[in-house]
Amino acid sequence: MISKRLRRITIMGASLGAAITFFVAGIIFWGGFHTIVEATNTMWFCTSCHEMQWVYEEYEDRPHYRNPTGVGATCSDCHVPDAWGPKMVRKVVATRELWHKALGSISTEEKFEAKRLELAERVWRSMLRTDSRECRNCHDWTAMDLEGQPSRAAREHARGFEQGQTCIECHQGIAHKLPEDWDESPVWAMAEPREPVTALDRGEPVYEPEVEEVADGEAVAAGDIASGLDWGDVPAVEITLFLPGQASIEWVQDGSQHGGGRAFGFGDRCIWCHDGEEADIGALVTSGEKLETEDLSGKRGHIPMTVQTAFDDDYLYMRFQWEATEHSPLPFVDGGRMDPDNPVKLAVSFADDRVEMADRAGCWASCHHDSPWMPDAPDAETLAASGIADRIDLSEGVTKYLSESRTDIEIRGRRGAARGGWDKLRDEEELEQLMRGGVYLDLARFKSGNGGRTESGYILAERHFSESEAVVFTGREEDGVWTVYMTRALRPGTEGDKPLATDGKYNIGIALHDDYAASRFHHVSWQYGLAFDAEIPGDFDDDMVELNAQRISR
């Protein structure tokens, strides 16, 4: 009786038995289909084709494969959507890859490299359209604890969130090697317009800056005052100098070489991202792993330094101390000493915000890719044949210069162009306008040879040094420690010596040629903010001033 009743029950026209059979078959079919789909998402499946072997080798060196947390991402995590609908669309589109497999479109590494940019552009377009959907399966803006992130990441994530950016706009190359000229791809025109960091086009007429007031010169330095002061109560700031290698201002701005190029273009100071990394950077340079082609293996990559800063109504006083080192000859220099007359040279630069990039990079704004010992330094024949050889001193190569003094600066070296702009010198009238407007980098240097000597000068179209009474250095090595004192007039009253107002903030940089070094083989600091007994925060933001000079009486 019951069996007859059950046979009479129908579901959508089918008997109960048939319905159950179809239901079970559906589960088996769906389970099998799902199993096959998931199998095609495994790392084994993705890398089973020989075309993917070199791609997989790249991936093994990336943080999505191995990282301190042990949480990784496989091919499908980045290339296959989680949602069922988009996932099926992706699987259907992926069938064309079987056709290209049969054609051998990327059957060799050479073929793959020829198509790397094209393949990358497809992924970038997709991620821009979907707001980096696959990234956001794991990374969520709202769940980010910016205070717990390194300062560099926190700043960029905060800016990206504010501007509505998507992950792929900054994180290209996170899993694979970037194609050549990737940053010139038209794909990025799809992104929301941002401030570009490109070659500087300085062909427009020079903006007439406000004329800098030069003091009357009544307070020129009266000799070595700093060494006689009581420094016991003056706060000491511990900094670390490091070897920069071939990191020019062009390299700093080039996002394809320097990951911080974009942040720098938005106005971030170098120190905000790299403070505390000085020893690591120096080690990369001395090992030749990055930014260096010469053998510096015997040199120390970084030098800890103690800096004290004080002032009164007339003078700025500074004391610098660091440990001396045993001589280590440079193998690429005859005699091992680049400057045999000077065991050390200490340079201090001052600038206000009239100098572009000085507020972020300090004296780095004057270090270019076409300077001596740099990759794009012109040879002597090229220098002699240039049309500016009678206007600036090129006898020892291209000295430091500011980008403002040139009509054009090549940053990226596109299509083999030399980076820098040494030969794009502005005319004399424009340079005079810049000088009158205070657009120069004030430079003072202590040379330890022959009992010590002070040089004072400035950088605009080139580097000028001369004798000056506005600044006096003294220094000596004692018990393995170098101590150098600087006495500098606040109101020098001479061209090229920046007048310093005690209610202002200035950009200061420190460079040390250690162990008979010269040229670019110096240890440098970040750009530091210099203020005078300022209330921090209050007068200035607390992330803008590192050296707050203490007022003293004498």
Image (cartoon, rainbow, N blue to C red):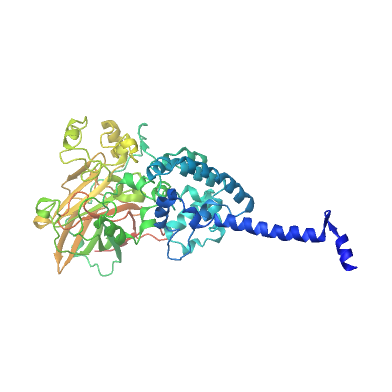
**How many tags in the picture?**
0
Against 304, residue 264 (above or below) is above
The percent coordinates of residue 117 (x first, y second) are 43, 41
In front of the other: 386 or 122? 122
Q: In which quarter of the image is the N terminus?
A: bottom right
Residue at 89 percent across and 64 percent down: it is 5
State the image quarter where residue 517 is shown. Answer: bottom left
In front of the other: 480 or 491? 480
Q: In the image, is 518 to the left or to the right of 440? A: left
Residue at 46 percent across and 62 percent down: it is 149
Question: Does residue 194 appear in the picture of this structure?
Answer: no
In front of the other: 316 or 478? 478
State the image quarter where residue 407 is shown. Answer: top left
In front of the other: 490 or 530? 530
Residue at 64 percent across and 50 percent down: it is 85
Question: Does residue 531 appear in the picture of this structure?
Answer: yes
Against 84, residue 279 (above or below) is below
Against 553, residue 181 (above or below) is above
Against 170, residue 202 (above or below) is above
The percent coordinates of residue 86 (x first, y second) are 61, 49
The percent coordinates of residue 265 (x first, y second) are 41, 46
The percent coordinates of residue 47 (x first, y second) are 46, 54
Q: Residue furthest right?
A: 1
Q: Quadrant of the C terminus?
A: bottom left
State the image quarter where residue 296 is shown. Answer: bottom left
